[in-house]
Image (cartoon, rainbow, N blue to C red):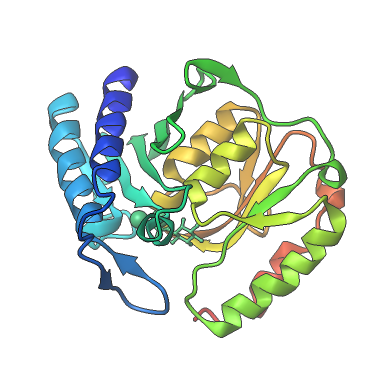
Amino acid sequence: MIQKIEEAAREAGRIILSAHGTDLGIENKEGHANFVTMYDRKVQDFLTARLREILPGAKFLGEENGMDVFAPGDDEGWLFVIDPIDGTTNFIHNMHPFVTSIGLMKDGKPYAGVVYAPVTDQMFSAVRGQGAYENGSRIHSSKASLADSILLSGSAGFSMNAFQIAQELTREFQSRSQGVRITGSAEYNLCMAASGRTGGYYEMRLGLWDFAAGGLILEEAGGRLTDYYGRPLSFRGPSSVLALSEGAARSELPDTGAYLDRWDGT
Ligand code: IPD
Ligand code: CA
Ligand code: CA
């Protein structure tokens, strides 16, 4: 089944790359710098149809279908959690990374994850209990300390209060590591930690579709995934996300929970 899901993600990547040079049909969503394009919808429709063939009866939760938390019954049976294009703003500017992300939950728990970056042709995948892979090769998170690693972060432009707190936290992380970068794709960031390239990734608020696939890939690669308070993620809706490699010690971290407490929620 995982190969079939990977093939669907690859096909989605072809649709995304075919956008180059065409009218993307860009629309504004709620808030600052929050866009959706015709291609987000196209890819979501394509994936919904293809994945339904792969797993008839599965339910769907996707960024572009308006649901952002579990509906009653979503914790029973199969549920696909899809972000057709994670990194839409990058995609609009034709700048890597942007990825297609497909998480598959079974009875409310992450079961499989596929993240495909079409520009670099990188396919990340994992099935629970079976390890994580990049283009067919097993991957492991880094054993380097936080001090010897680079980190990734993100901050959607939802409010100035959120942005300011994120910046202050980044100043802390910057001084405790070899530097913080912002890529513009949460799922890609999780895969970078899973594949040993970075020491981790943090963001104050992500949708479930931003971490459903990459979160499992990271855990299967030996990394650790919690919220800013250090609690395991429920995988049922939006959350703060703190992703760490094996080598990054908790004692090296700032008090991320205290920063989250200062956020007014806007
Ligand atoms: C966004 C990206 C970005 C992160 C935002 C997400 P989208 O997803 O993952 O890196 O900072 O929080 O909303 O809108 O490009 O699918
Ligand atoms: Ca996203
Ligand atoms: Ca998206």
Residue 158: x percent and y percent?
47, 76
**Residue 135, position as x, y percentages in the image:** 47, 21
Can residue 69 be seen by looking at this rendering?
Answer: yes
**Residue 254 visible in the snapshot:** no
Query: Residue 60 at x, y = what percent?
Result: 23, 45
Position of residue 64 measured from the top left corner of the image (x, y, whole percent): 25, 58
Q: Is residue 140 above or below residue 164?
A: above
Q: In the depicted view, which residue is nearer to us: 24 or 177? A: 24
Q: Is residue 260 left or right of residue 92?
A: right
Q: Residue at x 20, y 39 (%)?
A: 47
- Give the image quadrant in which the ligand numbered 2 is located: bottom left
Point out the image quarter for the N terminus: top left
Q: Is residue 238 above or below residue 58?
A: below
The residue at 20%/60% (across/down) is 23
Q: Residue at x 86, y 55 (%)?
A: 176
Give the side of residue 210 with respect to residue 222, left or right. left
> Residue at point 64% right, 39% down?
193
> Quadrant of the rendered structure where residue 14 is?
top left
